[in-house]
Image (cartoon, rainbow, N blue to C red):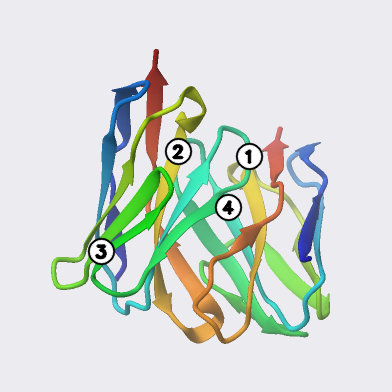
């Protein structure tokens, strides 16, 4: 069966510090991968998606970047965090080429102080 | 552009039926998802509609009208554990399976 792992679950970082959130998927190959951010009481905003290794598309301009160094690994990064980067970050995957649902990781609650 | 509207909050009584509506205007349409999200947790998949009509799955049903840009999620025999946020999401493009999410409807089930 397929599983998705995202860590850490919670993170408190000072303004200006770097960020690295990691997500890995097991039990499938060539998945579509996504990073979403969710503000309190709001829906999910798609930040990045990837259809393959090294292929990253950004949906919104921001202080963040993403990388896919391996087929089932997706990393969200920042060189210098801003207060506005606080939020609930969710990694997700879906089956490539098929209209199927997304499967989400447990999420990371990031607080920038 | 993409626009998905849902009511912000709803309240219902245990054992009752509740209908959560979603209207959408998107540049592409390849299906509509409903997800359930408990506070502080990740969303989990409930249903997927791509053709007009009603899809029933246990206590939950989902309806779609593509011509009206409208969907609803129907929850029957409400239980306390159904208290959660319900997210409507449109699969706007088959390219990479990208979905656009609404802001969600927070449902509170009272005894």
Q: Quadrant of the C terminus of chain B?
A: top left
Query: Are labels 3 and 4 on one chain?
Result: no
N-term-proximal mark, 1 vs 3: 1
Could you say which quadrant of the image residue A67 lies in?
bottom right
Left or right of B58? Residue A17 is right
Name the outermost residue toward the left: B68
Query: Are labels 1 and 2 on one chain?
Result: yes
The dot on residue A37 is 4
Residue hosting label 2:
B85
Residue hosting label 3:
B64
Depth check, front residue: B54 or A69: B54
Left or right of B5? Residue A86 is right
Using the numbered discs, state the Cα–Cα distance from disc 1 to disc 3 in whole angstroms. 27 Å
Nearer the viewer's eye, disc 1 or disc 4? Answer: 1
Give SS at disc 4. strand
Using the numbered discs, state the Cα–Cα distance from disc 2 to disc 3 in whole angstroms. 20 Å
Residue hosting label 1:
B41
């Amino acid at each position: 069966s397929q599983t998705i792992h995202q860590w850490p679950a919670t993170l408190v970082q000072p303004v200006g510090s770097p960020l690295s959130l990691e997500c890995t998927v097991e039990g499938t190959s060539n998945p579509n991968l996504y990073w979403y951010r969710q503000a309190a009481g709001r829906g999910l905003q798609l930040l990045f998606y990837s259809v393959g290794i090294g292929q990253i598309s950004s949906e919104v301009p921001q202080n963040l970047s993403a990388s896919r160094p391996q087929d089932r690994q997706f990393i969200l990064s920042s060189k210098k965090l801003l207060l506005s980067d606080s939020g609930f970050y969710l990694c997700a995957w879906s089956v490539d080429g098929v209209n199927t649902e997304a499967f989400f990781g447990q999420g990371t609650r990031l607080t920038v102080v | 552009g993409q626009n998905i509207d849902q009511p912000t909050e709803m309240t219902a009584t245990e054992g009752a039926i509740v209908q959560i509506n979603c209207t959408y205007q998107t540049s592409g349409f390849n299906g509509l998802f409903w997800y359930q999200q408990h506070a502080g947790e990740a969303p989990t998949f409930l249903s997927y509609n791509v053709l007009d009509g009603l899809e029933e799955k246990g206590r939950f049903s989902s309806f779609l009208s593509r011509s009206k840009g409208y969907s609803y999620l129907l929850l029957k025999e409400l239980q306390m554990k159904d208290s959660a946020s319900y997210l409507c999401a449109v699969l706007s493009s088959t390219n990479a399976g990208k979905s656009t999410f609404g802001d969600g409807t927070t449902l509170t089930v009272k005894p």
